[in-house]
Amino acid sequence: MLFISTTNLLSVLALASTLTGLVLADGPRSQCIVKLNATDGANCTSIAQQADVNLTTIQSLNPGVNCSGPLSSNDTLCTRQYTPKCTLNETATNQTCDGLASTYNLSTTDFVNYNDNVNGTCGNLTVGQTYCVSIDGCIPGNTGGFC
Ligand SMILES: *[C@@H]1O[C@H](CO)[C@@H](O)[C@H](O)[C@H]1NC(C)=O
Ligand SMILES: *[C@@H]1O[C@H](CO)[C@@H](O)[C@H](O)[C@H]1NC(C)=O
Ligand SMILES: *[C@@H]1O[C@H](CO)[C@@H](O)[C@H](O)[C@H]1NC(C)=O
Ligand SMILES: *[C@@H]1O[C@H](CO)[C@@H](O)[C@H](O)[C@H]1NC(C)=O
Ligand SMILES: *[C@@H]1O[C@H](CO)[C@@H](O)[C@H](O)[C@H]1NC(C)=O
Ligand SMILES: *[C@@H]1O[C@H](CO)[C@@H](O)[C@H](O)[C@H]1NC(C)=O
Ligand SMILES: *[C@@H]1O[C@H](CO)[C@@H](O)[C@H](O)[C@H]1NC(C)=O
Ligand SMILES: *[C@@H]1O[C@H](CO)[C@@H](O)[C@H](O)[C@H]1NC(C)=O
Ligand SMILES: *[C@@H]1O[C@H](CO)[C@@H](O)[C@H](O)[C@H]1NC(C)=O
Ligand SMILES: *[C@@H]1O[C@H](CO)[C@@H](O)[C@H](O)[C@H]1NC(C)=O
């Protein structure tokens, strides 16, 4: 009897997509939607309490911040992030980003935000790959570039 474990099944699927050249869209980047400015004497723990999230969340949303001691009064910490849902995928027929972006009235910045698998200048688009060209709407508190 043939037994395929979940791990094996995943490698089979990964292999199949490699063989067919099918690459799925990565989808939008996460955006910080709520930020807090550190006040004198604040540290990550007090910021976490203030924002009603745990310390792990604060650390993972602010990888560059040293949470071992007091924060600088200039530090702005992200306390909540949102990952938009893609509402429309499109296949790239040209390796320049501009054509695809402009068809959907997107700036390059928008397009980069909608696709976690392109670099900052959208200089590495791949013909035949699927990209996100539209995302869901705004949610309360969303001060990211989308609203
Ligand atoms: C946090 O600091 C930034 C930059 O200094 C400022 O623009 C913003 O208004 C401050 N936010 C709050 C809630 O004080
Ligand atoms: C911190 O909060 C997140 C989101 O609510 C949760 O998924 C995670 O398990 C929590 N971590 C700890 C260590 O409590
Ligand atoms: C954060 O500040 C609180 C008091 O506001 C203190 O009890 C705690 O030890 C501090 N934590 C760190 C990691 O410095
Ligand atoms: C983080 O801050 C602590 C306490 O202020 C300090 O001892 C440590 O060297 C800092 N770590 C980094 C990576 O800067
Ligand atoms: C905060 O930022 C201001 C302006 O960028 C700078 O002059 C000041 O030295 C900073 N303070 C700290 C504690 O880093
Ligand atoms: C876009 O593609 C991603 C990755 O394949 C998929 O998860 C998502 O459901 C697709 N979205 C739409 C609206 O087709
Ligand atoms: C891709 O688009 C650019 C700019 O719109 C155009 O100059 C170029 O000829 C196109 N390349 C192909 C292979 O269609
Ligand atoms: C892009 O904008 C133009 C002009 O505002 C409009 O006519 C067109 O329908 C828009 N296209 C999309 C895909 O939203
Ligand atoms: C494009 O660049 C981004 C960011 O460096 C990377 O994650 C992605 O894998 C690259 N895509 C291709 C097709 O090389
Ligand atoms: C994006 O990738 C292209 C192609 O690899 C490269 O020429 C360009 O410098 C990269 N841009 C950034 C900001 O990494």
Image (cartoon, grey):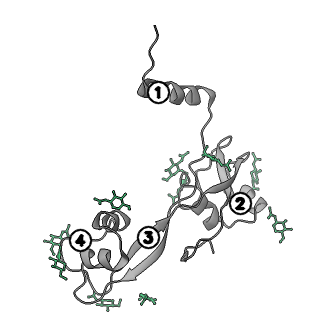
Cβ–Cβ under 8 Å for marks 3 and 2? no
First in residue order: circle 2 vs circle 1: 1
User: What residue did someone put label 3 on?
Assistant: 80
Closer to the N terminus: mark 2 or mark 4? 4
Q: Is mark 4 within 8 Å of ligand 3?
A: yes
* Residue at image location 62% in from the left, 71% down from the top: 138
| Picture coordinates of residue 139, whole percent (x, y) | 59, 71
Q: Amino acid at mark 3?
A: Arg
Q: Is residue 86 above or below residue 40?
A: above
What amino acid type should be assigned to the residue bearing mark 2? Ala
Look at the numbered discs 3 and 4 and tell me whether their residues touch, using CB distance below 8 Å: no
Mark sitting on residue 11 = 1
Which quarter shows the C terminus? bottom right
Q: Residue at x 66, y 45 (%)?
A: 130
Position of residue 5 relative to residue 71, above or below, is above
Residue holding disc 2: 101
**Identity, as a three-letter code, of the amino acid under mark 4:** Cys
Would you say the residues marked 2 and 4 are in contact, meaning their CB atoms lie under 8 Å apart? Answer: no
* Of the two numbered discs 2 and 1 in the rendering, the one whose residue sits closer to the viewer: 1
Judge depth for marks 2 and 4 and give the one in front.
4
